């Protein structure tokens, strides 16, 4: 009898045992079977363990979407370690912060990113193991091991020691905090398994599914496409981006894709494409959307473009992965809703006193379920704010910090955010982090960064800047400076230059007054 899935690496190993010759992954023109991926992850896990990686240590995966990234994630888990996926556009100082914050023992990356990794690891003394894909001889970083050598230096039939409990920490996903420093969201194996099980249940995921994902693995929405596909033994077609949508649509038709996760930016690109024949996507069974709500007009047009496809509108946050989904049959009835709680979850709205609100009353969304995080890595203050006592003495529930209301039937509607965090392109952006970069530019005297509604991005990042007239900064100067110091998703879309910004009564720069001017 096959053992029950209790750990995340079992998603791969058990599917490999059931269907060894089935294609699990299509990436960079290569097709990987479940047996091939599982064996590669075993070899890399053994290689990492042989180099001193210990149970519970942290492994940062700093890679683009690729087969190597997928293998790296499962190898870390098979070695009993904790993986932490980090966006490969992250700058060296922020990567160094993450490496030091979690005291990473290893980092796995690609040759194209070794410059950033070299800078970051120079200030991260805990990193003992560096593995580089695409550098066959391991020459790009002193002391590094090539990915290819790591796979080749152990016998194929050698397997790493197996961990057996689901209360081990599985992953740390870093998300921006209100202070501007990233916070590591701690997820146990049982949290991840619970989330993946719930989502694949309402999506009715099947082994014959073929899922196209262009979402970064460093983004939990993209990461879970890997995890959920392997859990049910389906096939994942993994691409690096949606930069060339016609090519992606052509590949979707050729691969007979049945599932397509997207974000509003991608939906907008699809809707603005001219003369596209989507009849070739007859196998597409479902589309999912999260990161930000699709405008109602976009939903209606998506339904017209894909009349035979079920469209799932969803809401979630890194701290619990997914909270709600709108059953597709409700989309025409209440397109502005993010739905009901996902299976095995309770989602409810409370007022400032912690009492459940009446229909129509705005309050904070609270999530209860087995997928709720364990807290923020070594950040008890932030953890205490987010996780509070639940129904039972041993339980904590997640206060999301987001404002919601319900209708008479209990369907949930997103209203706004309690804090200043901007959610753009599915990523959380701390205004303070962008402001710090702005202040580093000579001539910037005052800066406030805020989110403004955007039908594609969810929220667009706007920088309102007071500059010294003598310096003569232009919008292009500011955007160029930001591009040199910030990840792509953190770049302001709009820059407004002024001579002075509003102040509060005590003379301090007032974010509230700046935001009020843009309402």
Image: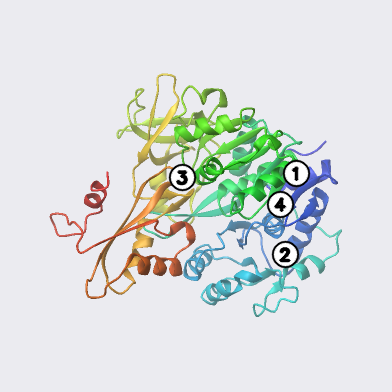
Kind of element beneath mark 2: helix
Closer to the camera: disc 2 or disc 1? Answer: 1
| The image quarter in which residue 15 lies | top right
Q: Which mark is residue 321?
A: none
Q: For residue 6, say whether it is visible.
A: no
Q: Residues within 10 Å of mark 4 (few under 14, many from 20)?
A: some
Tag 2 residue? 49
Q: For residue 439, say whether it is visible.
A: yes
Cα gap from disc 2 to disc 1, whole angstroms: 40 Å
Residue closest to the far left: 505
Check if mark 4's residue and mark 2's residue have beta carbons within 8 Å: no
Q: Residue shown at 24%/46% (left/top)?
A: 516
Tag 4 residue? 163
Kind of element beneath mark 1: helix
Tag 3 residue? 456
Closer to the camera: disc 2 or disc 3? Answer: 3
Considering only order in the chain, which callout, 1 or 4, is on the residue closer to the N terminus? 4
Considering only order in the chain, which callout, 2 or 4, is on the residue closer to the N terminus? 2
Cα gap from disc 3 to disc 1, whole angstroms: 28 Å
Kind of element beneath mark 3: loop
As displayed, is residue 143 above or below residue 375? below
In this image, 478 relative to 28: left or right?
A: left
In this image, 514 relative to 505: left or right?
A: right
Tag 1 residue? 254
| The image quarter in which residue 106 lies | bottom right
């Amino acid at each position: 009898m096959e053992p029950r899935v209790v750990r995340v690496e079992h998603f791969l190993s058990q599917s490999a045992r059931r269907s060894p010759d089935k294609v699990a992954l299509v990436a960079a023109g290569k097709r990987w079977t479940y047996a091939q991926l599982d064996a590669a992850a075993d070899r890399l896990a053994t290689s990492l363990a042989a180099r001193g990686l210990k149970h519970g240590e942290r492994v940062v995966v700093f890679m683009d979407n690729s087969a190597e990234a997928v293998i790296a994630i499962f190898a870390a888990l098979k070695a009993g370690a904790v993986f932490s996926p980090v966006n490969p556009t992250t700058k060296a100082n922020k990567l160094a912060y993450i490496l030091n914050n979690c005291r990473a023992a290893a980092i796995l990356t690609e040759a194209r990113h070794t410059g950033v990794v070299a800078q970051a690891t120079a200030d991260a003394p805990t990193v003992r193991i560096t593995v580089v894909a695409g550098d066959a001889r391991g020459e790009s970083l002193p002391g590094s091991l090539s990915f290819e050598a790591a796979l080749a230096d152990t016998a194929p039939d050698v397997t790493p020691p197996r961990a057996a409990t689901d209360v081990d920490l599985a992953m740390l996903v870093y998300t921006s905090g209100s202070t501007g420093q990233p916070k590591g969201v701690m997820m146990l194996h049982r949290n991840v398994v619970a989330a993946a099980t719930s989502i694949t249940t309402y999506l009715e995921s099947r082994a014959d599914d073929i899922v196209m994902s262009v979402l970064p693995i460093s983004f939990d929405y993209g990461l879970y496409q890997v995890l959920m596909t392997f859990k049910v033994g389906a096939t994942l077609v993994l691409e690096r981006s949606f930069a060339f949508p016609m090519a992606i649509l052509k590949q979707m038709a050729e691969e007979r894709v049945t599932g397509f996760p997207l974000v509003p930016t991608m939906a907008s690109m699809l809707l603005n494409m001219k003369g596209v024949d989507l009849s070739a996507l007859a196998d597409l069974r479902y589309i999912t959307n999260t990161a930000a709500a699709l405008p109602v007009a976009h939903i209606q047009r998506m339904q017209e473009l894909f009349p035979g496809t079920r469209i799932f509108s969803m809401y979630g946050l890194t701290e619990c992965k997914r909270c709600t989904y709108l059953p597709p049959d409700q989309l025409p009835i209440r397109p502005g809703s993010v739905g009901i709680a996902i299976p095995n979850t309770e989602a409810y709205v409370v007022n400032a006193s912690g009492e459940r609100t009446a229909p129509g009353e705005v309050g904070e969304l609270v999530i209860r379920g087995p997928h709720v995080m364990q807290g923020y890595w070594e950040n008890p203050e932030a953890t205490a704010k987010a996780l509070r006592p639940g129904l039972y003495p041993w339980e904590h529930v997640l206060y999301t910090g987001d404002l919601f209301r319900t209708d008479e039937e209990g369907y949930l509607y997103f209203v706004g955010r309690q804090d200043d965090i901007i959610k753009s392109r599915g990523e959380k952006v701390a205004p303070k982090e962008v402001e710090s970069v702005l202040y580093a530019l000579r001539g910037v005297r005052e800066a406030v960064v805020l989110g403004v509604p955007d039908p594609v991005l969810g929220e667009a990042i706007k920088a309102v800047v007071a500059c010294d007239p003598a310096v003569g900064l232009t919008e292009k100067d500011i955007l160029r400076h930001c591009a040199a110091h910030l990840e792509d998703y953190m770049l302001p879309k709009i820059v407004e230059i002024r001579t002075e910004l509003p102040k509060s009564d005590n003379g301090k720069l007032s974010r509230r007054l700046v935001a009020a001017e843009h309402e």
